[in-house]
Image: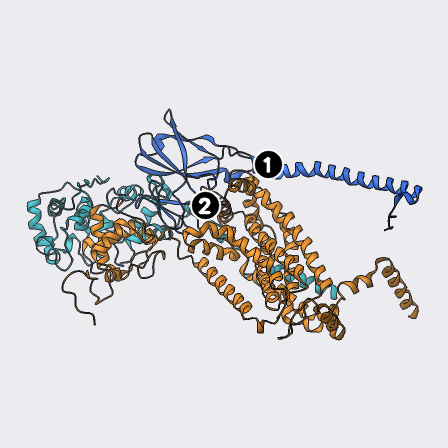
Chain colours: A blue, B cyan, C orange
Amino acid sequence: MNEEPANPCACKTESKKTSRRDFLLATGFGLNTLAGAMIGIPLLGYVLSSFFKPNPLTKISLGPVENFPEGKTRFASYRNPMPRQWDGQTADIPCWVRRIQGNDFQVFAINCTHLGCPVRWFEESKLFMCPCHGGAFYEDGGHAAGPPPRGLYTYEVKVEQGELFIMGGVLPNLSNQNV
Amino acid sequence: MIRTTLLLATLFALAACDGMPGRPKPASRWKSPSEITDFATLYRQNCLGCHGMDQEVSGSLPMDAKTYLAVLPREVLFDVIAGGIPSTAMPGFSTKSGGTLTEAQIKILADGILAKKPSAPDATLPPYAAEPGDPARGATAFAAACASCHGEGGTGGKAGSVVHPAYLDLVSSQYLRTIVIAGRPDLGCPDFANRIPGRRMTNEEISDVVAWLTSNRKNEFGQPLVPVKSSLP
Amino acid sequence: MNKVIQAARGIFLWVDDRLHLTKLYESTAGHHVPQSSGSWFYVFGSATLLCFMVQVATGIMLAMVYVPSAAEAYASLEYLTFHQYLGWFLRAVHYWGSNFMVGIMLLHMTQVFLFGAYKYPREITWITGVFLMVLTLGLAFTGQVMRFDEDAYWGLGIGVAILGRVPFLGEQLVNLMLGGPIIASDTLSRFFALHVFVLPGGVLAIVSLHLRMVLTKGINEYPRPGQLVQRETYDKEYAAILKKEGVPFFPKAISKDLVAASIVLFGILACASFFGPKGPLGPPNPVQIDTLPRPDFFFLWIFAVAALMPDWMESVALLGGPVIIGLFLLALPFFNGTGEKSWRRRPIAVLTVLLTYVALGLLTYLGHTSPWSPEMEAWKSDPTPKEFLAGRSPLELQGSLVIQSMQCRNCHAIDGIGGQRGPDLAAVGARLTKDQLIRQVIQGGGNMPAYGKNLSPDQVEAVVTYMVSLRPPGVTPARDSTLPGRPPLE
């Protein structure tokens, strides 16, 4: 590295040369920063696109209401409303459907509110039990025992022309199910 | 020479490697629970908790009681496993009634249980199901056939009360009839042929005893009685 | 002959002149280290790096067959395990390699901590090490997702449930982790990119910095009690040590590393060939809920922590815990950068290590046995032991059936058989009176659900009568202490 002269006016020709070099250096830096940003920002946007996407709740059919006997809680599943062709089995989302009576339904997400493990329904004791840390929930989804911080997550339910619909498509967790 | 040895050693190492005990066996492949078709496994996973096996004392009727198997129609067994018996401790196991077993698996269970049926059944077996008889005659028949263990009026004795209202509310009438016919070999309760010294209980006596037992059902605990409707004929 | 040697020497000198091999050797493998660091305690760092190299080699091989697609990953895993020649072996080496890597990294960190090697002037060596630990654990977690089976699927669900607890940003972070609002194909592709490109790349980059620090700031001399580190004098002291007893790392100090390396390699090979790979368990099918999600070995302790923590501190601990531990580790060389190095004079350091190991060991054991989980099949598959049925009245036998059919056994064992979540019922009649039992069954409490709505009065009568009869031979039923006739205390 050459030591720059302290006073550029000391030598005119040198100063001209230096200023051109400086200009090129600055241009080089500037252009590369610009180009880097033009590559980098789309890159970040690509990765973070899921960060800003609003969660799309879609109306999904769970089939005719007759499939669900009154007073019982039954297993049901639906396809992810925004699937990829290569989703395979992971696009099948399970849930528990409780038909209280008539068109009065409760649909629970399968995920335990503690750490998301799949809760299982026990018809006899009318409890949902979680295989991970022993969370238990009552028939109406209320917290019965164990570490879960709240009752089971529920889907919004609609019954139209004898068909049961839920608003689904999002993996429920504490951040999107604050009740 | 050295090269050949090395080559052989490498091949040998590779071959040995692929045969090491850590190699997963095809049998250890994951199987869906609905693919289990082995009777012993299915029975152990689903029935053993209440029905026991091999003359161990069990909570409910053991599934290897000879007289029971002799009178039990296959369809009834299949229907009970699939649909359960309402208002009793027997749940339905078919997927339709909220359980986890497929129809094929229930068939395997029913067949496996009935495989222990005595090959030459007694010709004079009472029918599995029948209309209840006369309670008054039943009291007499009970005194003759059952009171030696269950006490006078069925209220106690060494085998315990059979007229406790909670007990009578928790069992179906068919269950009572089945026990009167088949006994509880695991508990030492004899079947219909060995209760009264010297003779068998007649079908009429069996129906009468059941009628008398069910006539003892009371609403003692302040809740309307749920009529025990059996899905059985 | 002489001519041949001459020619060879000429070629070597030419190559060396162009490639500067001698200089490379002098500044790297031949750098001088204190003779005292040629110790068995100093082999863990190179052994961790060796594990990483094994992981890279086997990982590349596996990636040649594995398909990172949610629809096909499971099939390709099964193909690898059961059909591809030696595919199971590579999977096994990769799986055991990861276990060894995490374990030996922990040993390395412990040794560095106990020997005070993080102190002046090796702060950055330690800090890069902390980042390497985070990356290694990240590789372990993403690797568990690569084995795309039911455990992977529900493991992701656990990750979602933890991230979802982050205030304000929870939803966005969940979306970022999953690549969408739901566990699906984008999730697996994302974790594949992390596991195969991002994290190994990060490890390579930081390992080079880590090793560069070893070269510039030297390897820690074997600490002697009483020899204190001081910022003003340490550099001179270290230079004096190197001058007095410095030896080139290669070939003078490497021997023990080499022996340890072979032990590690043989260990991985032995485990791989005798125990084989893990899984794959059931397919990643969310509808198949007959599953017991468990994390891999190295995360079992977190699984246990999540079960045992009081509810109120759970979110704080799950989110704040890693941050606090991370900050503590990063700050360690700054608030404790000088002074005593030898563990013989650092009782708090020794206690910290012991406590950490005991806690991790216990939690891992508990996570493995997970006594807090209900046994989902116990109610229909675990019979009541016969001594708890024999001689019971018909009503009591019905009570035992209520216990079975109401899934009580999922949480309550009888004489050790059944779930371990609630108390064993074998002697419950000696502990609680009939009234207390009725209250407990109906109202629940103490982490038991209330069964009041789900049991008929008849069932309550039966089950309570039965439970009163559950006593060891010769023990009378529990008695109500408020009733008269209570004998004086002896």
Q: Nearer the viewer, residue A138 or C392?
A: A138
Q: What residue is rendered at 24% in x and 55% in y?
A: C437
Q: What is the quadrant of the N terminus of chain C in the image?
A: bottom right
**In this rendering, position of residue A36 left or right of residue A101:** right
**In this rendering, position of residue C1 left or right of residue C338:** right
Chain to which the residue tagged by mark 2 belongs: A
Mark 1 is surrounded, within 10 Å at the Cα level, by few (under 14), some (14 to 19) or many (20 or more) other residues, namely some
Q: Nearer the viewer, residue C479 or C223?
A: C223
Residue B51, position as x, y percentages in the image: 28, 53
Specify the amino acid type for callout 2.
Gly
Chain to which the residue tagged by mark 1 belongs: A
Residue A57, position as x, y percentages in the image: 48, 32
Query: Which label is found at residue C62?
Result: none
Mark 2 is surrounded, within 10 Å at the Cα level, by few (under 14), some (14 to 19) or many (20 or more) other residues, namely many
Q: Could you tell me how many numbered marks the image carries?
A: 2
On the question of residue B66 being in view, the answer is no
Q: What is the quadrant of the C terminus of chain C in the image?
A: bottom left
Dot 2 or dot 1: first in sequence order is: 1
On the question of residue A174 being in view, the answer is yes
Are the residues at dot 2 and dot 1 in contact (C-beta closer than 8 Å)? no
Residue B122, position as x, y percentages in the image: 20, 50
Query: Which label is found at residue A116?
Result: 2
Residue B80, position as x, y percentages in the image: 28, 43
Residues at marks 2 and 1, CA–CA distance in whole angstroms: 24 Å
SS for dot 1:
helix
Q: Nearer the viewer, residue C69 or C455?
A: C455
Q: Nearer the viewer, mark 2 or mark 1?
A: 1
**In this rendering, position of residue C67 left or right of residue C409:** right
What residue sits right under mark 1 in the picture? A49
Specify the amino acid type for callout 1.
Ser
Above or below — where is A150 with respect to A107? Answer: below
SS for dot 2:
loop
